[in-house]
Image (cartoon, grey):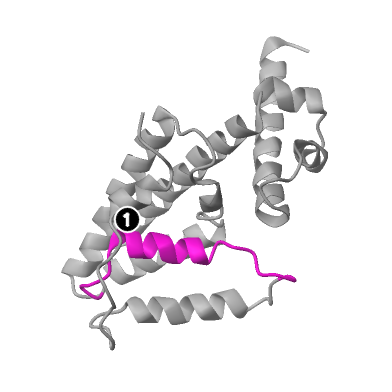
Amino acid sequence: MSTRGRQAEARRNDLRLLRAAHEVFTTQGFDAPVSAIAKAAGVGMGSLYRRYRTKEELFQRLCVIAMERGMEAAEAGLAEPDPWKGLCLYVRTCVGYRAGALAPVAGTITTTEEMWRTARKATELADRLITRARETGVLRSDVTTLDISLLMEQFSHPAPGGEHPHAKERLLTIALDGLRAPGATELPGEPPGMEWYEGRWGSAP
């Protein structure tokens, strides 16, 4: 096999590993053995360890990918001329791939410069999208970017015993309607801040 062919195969193996890891961790729990990931990906343990020496490295890479996909979703939302449709597109896209499913590993892994750098870019894009929705009067004024991030996190957890085919979509539609301005009920308490949110992951390097 040529060098180019081996590189292409390595990329395919890496993609299978990452997809399998996300599925295994978010359905079987974060203490699932890496052997389950290799099996689900259809690769040997040697292939896994050549790419990711530890489970922590795998978690770190998955977190970066989740944030990169969030950035893509926010960019797609900003490209939608209608601010409300753009916001809904962002939320539904992120919930669709369970963007917040990795939140439970916060505080259990070492955060990298790449993770913090990607997180800041993702937050900046989400802020732009949500600020646009708020300033055009379609999003209630007391909802923050972090509120929406935490909402998506809640919808990212798998339902015990399996999911009804329409349950999540019904509940997400109800939740999105609750974000619409002006809002029927005042939100209780002060909103959580980024200092609290980032503190869950530890100090930035």
Q: Quadrant of residue 147?
A: bottom left
Name the kind of residue labelled 1 in the image: Ala
Q: Quadrant of residue 129?
A: bottom left
Q: Nearer the viewer, residue 61 or 16?
A: 61
Q: Mark 1 — residue?
A: 79
Residue name at image x 54 percent, y 41 percent: 108
Question: Is residue 109 shown above or below 141?
Answer: above
Q: Nearer the viewer, residue 169 or 153?
A: 153
Q: Which residues are magenta?
A: 140-162
Residue 2 at x, y = what percent?
73, 11
Residue name at image x 67 percent, y 48 percent: 25
Residue 173 at x, y = what percent?
47, 79
Question: Is residue 146 shown above or below 21?
Answer: below
Residue 120 at x, y = what percent?
32, 41
Residue 3 at x, y = what percent?
69, 11
Question: Is residue 147 shown above or below 66?
Answer: below
